[in-house]
Amino acid sequence: MKSFILYNGDPSLKIPDCLFKGTKTLQLMDMTRVQLPTLPSSLQFLEKLQTLCLDYCVLGDIALIGEIKMLKVLSLVGSNIDRLPREIGQLTSLQLLDLTKNPTLEIIPPNVLSCLTQLEDLYMENSFLQWGVEGLDSPRNNASLAELKDLPCLSTLYLHITNPMILPKDFFSKKLERFNILIGEGWDWSSKRETSTIMKLKISASIQSEEGIQLLLKRTEDLHLDGLEGVKSVSYELDGQGFPSLKHLHIQNSLEIRYIVDSTMSSPIVAFPFLVSLSLDNLNKLEKICNGQPVAESFSKLRILKVKSCPMLKNLFSLHMQRGLLQLEEISIIDCEIMEVIVAEESGGEADEDEAIKLTQLRTLTLEYLPQFTSVSSKSNAASISQTRPEPLITDVRSNEIASDTGVGTPMALFNKKVIPNLEELWLNVKDAAKVCQGQFSADLFHKVRVLGLRCFDDAPFGILNRFHNMEKLAVTHSYFKELFPCQLVDEDEHTLARIRCLELWRLPNLEKIWNQDLRMDQLLQNLETLEVSFCGSLINLAPSASSFGNLKALHVRDCEALKYLVTSSTARSLVQLSVMSIEGCKMVTEIVASNGDEAGNEIIFSKLESLKLDCLASLTSFCSVNFTFRFPRLTEVIVTNCPKMKTFSLGILSTPRLQKVWLSEEKDKGHWKRDLNITIQQLHI
């Protein structure tokens, strides 16, 4: 046998001490979620073992690992060890050490890491932070960063250094090929990994000029900068080569930055040629993204541009710069006090008088809290086109100011097919909706809209739905009506609703019913696949008792304080496609399925339900209080947290053939199981 792999789900499983005595040829061992307070002594006989993975295990003393001299890969992900034993330093053949997700790790003895002379990959994401300082700690209790500096083969490093002042001189070298390095307090580890070279820096001016930092900046693909000091022009002062490798740039909390690129300060170079996303947040003195005319190909790959809390910024870019931004797919501008336009025509520009502003790839445009905003462009002919030929435009408009009555500040200045032709997602408040309803738009103005968001409505939002013939998702929020569909709809509205696949309702404090029992809205919503209802404190029921949802796949309900049950038994029988159900924070809910007159003993089958989450349900006593037979043939995940009155799952026959555990936390790090689901729930409160 060369491989031993065990993915465990039973916390009571014990590994015999002699299990590996007869497996001397073993080369790979992977045990996940196993309780190992003491490692089996037979591990020391595995002379040929090269890979050992003990991920998400409960580990005690692991010093015995030091006896496995041929080990090349050691992974202890998520095992919450508090110290790395000194014996690990004996693994002189080790090439990969993964200590990811070990926030309790506080001790790595000095001169352990420096002994791992063959180490190529070191992962310490969300892990050890207590680095010692050579020359200051006497005696030193922990490893120092200088030990990593001396590892000759190290090419991959994931590391968080909270105190930049302990960085050794010339710590970073050319040998690093893959890195995710956080320096300074306050950084989080991102779960998304789109690049192999990431840096997040919150450092002083003296440290940011250090040669090793500068070396990595030139090779970084994803860069986050916080609190930059002494920098007025990012590209010019941080990297004179224009960041040729950078794909993602996020800058926040700077009091000095005036420009991202200043083309007037040096010989022009191509700036950010491969940048895909740019995010600027809380830059108090930022005046322009680009000062002067950038070299062609600058920003030519940019797809996402987000700007927030930049009080000195009047526009995003100039007309001559927008020709290089044809790939933009998403623009977000939030809380910029003097922002007037997206594209500005600067004095002395050489723009063609007849040139239209074309953002042909734009899919999402978010505008919030922009009191001075007037239009997409200051160019006069763009404004005249938008007022005389209103055609399809934009996506995701979130702004009270967009609907203001200030000349070109009306929606007419935005709804222009020649500016942005691919409207897919649109958010409107009541004022915006009135403008849309009153405007003389062409018949196909919103023909590409798939997502419609409505907010701040005092009355149910009728009269607008029939303009969105291809809508697949309807989201309604921060409104104050009692019923979403209080009366019979006209035919055009019915045809629109029949296409909806997702309905999201949140923060509707007065909503008592989604629709009246006299209406058969469930027949119109026959294609509905996702229903999400959150923070609707007055909601009495999700749907009338006889409603049917034959295509619903996901049902999520949260913080609906007046709700006493989720669905009736007849509605439950219709949920033949439902795969995910979660109910959270509904303090009056006593049961999930309520009887509407069915006889006890009748069968209800959730044939495709795989995941069920019950969280913070203070009054919940059971899934159903009637003696029904429940069958869950595919149920594999049940999470029950903060349900103090839940004494059993159901009163009748219960079948969950694939369920092996009830998780007691959303992180699924603590679970329980005793014979079946009913007994398990009963034992939770013993």
Image (spheres, rainbow, N blue to C red):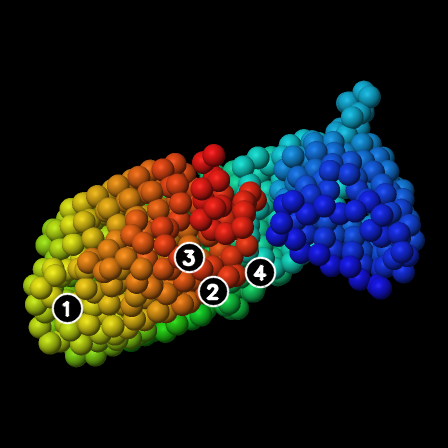
- CA separation, marks 3 and 2? 13 Å
From the viewer's perspective, tell me whether residue 617 is left or right of residue 660: left
Residue 92 in picture, x, y percent from top left: 90, 47
Look at the numbered disc 3 and give the secondary structure of its residue.
strand
Q: Nearer the viewer, residue 357 or 429?
A: 429
| Residue 308, disc | none
Report which residue position mark 1 lands on: 520
Q: Tell me: residue 341, above or below residue 36.
A: below
Residue 458 pos. (x, y %): 11, 51
Q: Which residue is mark 3?
A: 654
Q: Amino acid at mark 2?
A: Arg
Q: Amino acid at mark 3?
A: Leu
Disc 1 to disc 3, C-alpha distance: 32 Å
Q: Please give the residue where the numbered disc 2 appears in the rendered image.
A: 634
**Foreground: disc 4 or disc 2:** 2
Say whether disc 3 or disc 2 marks the residue closer to the N-terminus: 2
Of badges 1 and 3, the one in the foreground is 3
* Above or below, comparing residue 104 to residue 472 in the picture: above
Q: Nearer the viewer, residue 677 or 548?
A: 677
Which part of the image, by quadrant, shows the N terminus?
bottom right
Classed neighbour count for the residue bearing mark 2: other residues with Cα under 10 Å, few (<14), some (14–19), many (≥20): some
Residue identified by numbered label 4: 194
Q: Nearer the viewer, residue 269 or 334?
A: 334
Q: Secondary structure at mark 1?
A: loop
Q: Residue furthest bottom?
A: 443
Tell me where residue 556 appears, x and y as whole percent: 34, 55
Amino acid tagged 4: Glu
- Circle nearer the N terminus (4, 2): 4
Earlier-in-chain disc, 3 versus 4: 4
Q: Are marks 1 and 2 in contact (CB under 8 Å)?
A: no
Crowding at label 3, few (<14), some or many (≥20) Cα neighbours within 10 Å? some
Q: Amino acid at mark 1?
A: Arg
